[in-house]
Image (cartoon, rainbow, N blue to C red):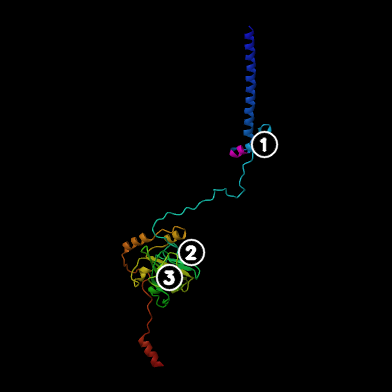
């Protein structure tokens, strides 16, 4: 009998403890819900709740250290974009033909010719676009406005036969680099002359006449002045893609038109006005 009463008493005590524990659990859950709802939303809210809550260890209350945030306008570490270099697409390395100066140029045919006029300040450096050998050096302009001969229009100019097999022309120069002569080996980026406005550019601002073609006899000046549209390659070299090569484009164009195509644009010089012998004789008689 005593054992039954004791067992019943313990049972009641356990029920009371269980009920008490349940109430505590409910109260704790409600507290958590209130904290979650009243705090800021998202991760920031969770961080704020953790920062403001106190932790008790051995009776000592300590506040959690708040997570530092970057100041306005400050890029967090690792946020700066990394510029990836373009892949190497040829065995050749190129340089933009004007060095150390601001430039502008059109990306279209000029006077019907596949060449580029690169506008830059007078005296800026014209440099070799690729490793190669000097082919022609014309240190003095022979262009005359009364004849406008096609072979003379580029004024002071230099041609380079690149290791890629492409012939490069830089014209309208003011001067040629000292010691530059045919047969001299040059490197990409090496100074070849100074930009000016010689030849038929005498009445314009200073600029570089830049043409790309294939090697041929200098008498075929209409080929030398440019057969390959250059601006795609100029854009690439200027923007860091220094291995984009015009070699295959040049080969394709030469295959399309032939190695010695006829001149079709700006070919004939102006006629020279020769004095009439009869008028000259009449003038002599009068005098």
Q: Residues within 10 Å of mark 3 (few under 14, many from 20)?
A: many
Sequence-first disc among 3 and 1 = 1
Q: Quote the CA–CA distance across marks 3 and 1.
A: 78 Å
User: Which residue is identified by label 2?
Assistant: 104
User: Which residue is identified by label 3?
Assistant: 171
Q: Secondary structure at mark 2?
A: strand
Q: Residues within 10 Å of mark 2 (few under 14, many from 20)?
A: few
Q: Nearer the viewer, mark 2 or mark 1?
A: 1
Q: Secondary structure at mark 1?
A: strand
Q: Residue at x 41, y 71 (%)?
A: 158
Picture quadrant of residue 143: bottom left
Name, please, the residue furthest toward the top.
Answer: 1
Q: Nearer the viewer, residue 171 or 271?
A: 171
Q: Which residues are magenta?
A: 43-47
Residue 174 in the image, given as x and y percentages of width and height = 46, 73
When the figure is inspected, residue 61 is found, relative to residue 150, above or below; the finding is above
Residue 234 in the image, given as x and y percentages of width and height = 44, 61
Q: Quote the CA–CA distance across marks 2 and 1.
A: 65 Å
The answer to whether the residue labelled 2 contacts the one labelled 1, judged by CB atoms less than 8 Å apart, is no
User: Which residue is identified by label 1?
Assistant: 62
Q: Residues within 10 Å of mark 1 (few under 14, many from 20)?
A: few
């Amino acid at each position: 009998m005593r054992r039954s009463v004791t067992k019943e008493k313990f049972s009641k005590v356990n029920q009371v403890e269980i009920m008490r524990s349940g109430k505590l659990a409910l109260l704790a859950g409600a507290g958590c819900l209130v904290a979650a709802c009243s705090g800021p939303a998202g991760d920031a809210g969770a961080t704020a709740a953790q920062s403001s809550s106190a932790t008790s260890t051995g009776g000592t209350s300590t506040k959690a250290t708040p997570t530092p945030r970057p100041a306005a306008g400050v890029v967090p570490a690792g946020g700066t974009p990394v510029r990836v270099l373009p892949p190497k697409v040829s065995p050749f390395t190129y340089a933009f033909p004007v060095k150390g100066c601001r430039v502008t140029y059109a990306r279209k045919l000029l006077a019907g010719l596949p060449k580029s006029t690169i506008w830059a300040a007078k005296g800026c450096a014209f440099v070799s676009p690729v490793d190669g050998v000097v082919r022609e050096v014309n240190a003095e302009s022979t262009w005359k406005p009364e004849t406008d001969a096609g072979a003379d229009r580029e004024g002071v100019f230099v041609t380079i036969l690149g290791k890629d097999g492409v012939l490069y022309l830089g014209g309208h120069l003011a001067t040629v680099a000292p010691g530059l002569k045919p047969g001299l080996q040059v490197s990409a980026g090496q100074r070849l002359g100074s930009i000016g406005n010689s030849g038929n550019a005498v009445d314009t601002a200073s600029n570089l006449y830049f043409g790309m073609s294939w090697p041929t006899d200098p008498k075929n000046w209409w080929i030398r002045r440019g057969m390959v549209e250059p601006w795609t390659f100029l854009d690439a070299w200027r923007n860091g893609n220094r291995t984009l090569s015009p070699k295959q484009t040049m080969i394709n164009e030469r295959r399309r038109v032939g190695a010695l195509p006829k001149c079709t644009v700006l070919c004939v010089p102006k006629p020279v006005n020769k004095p009439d012998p009869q008028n000259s004789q009449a003038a002599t008689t009068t005098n």
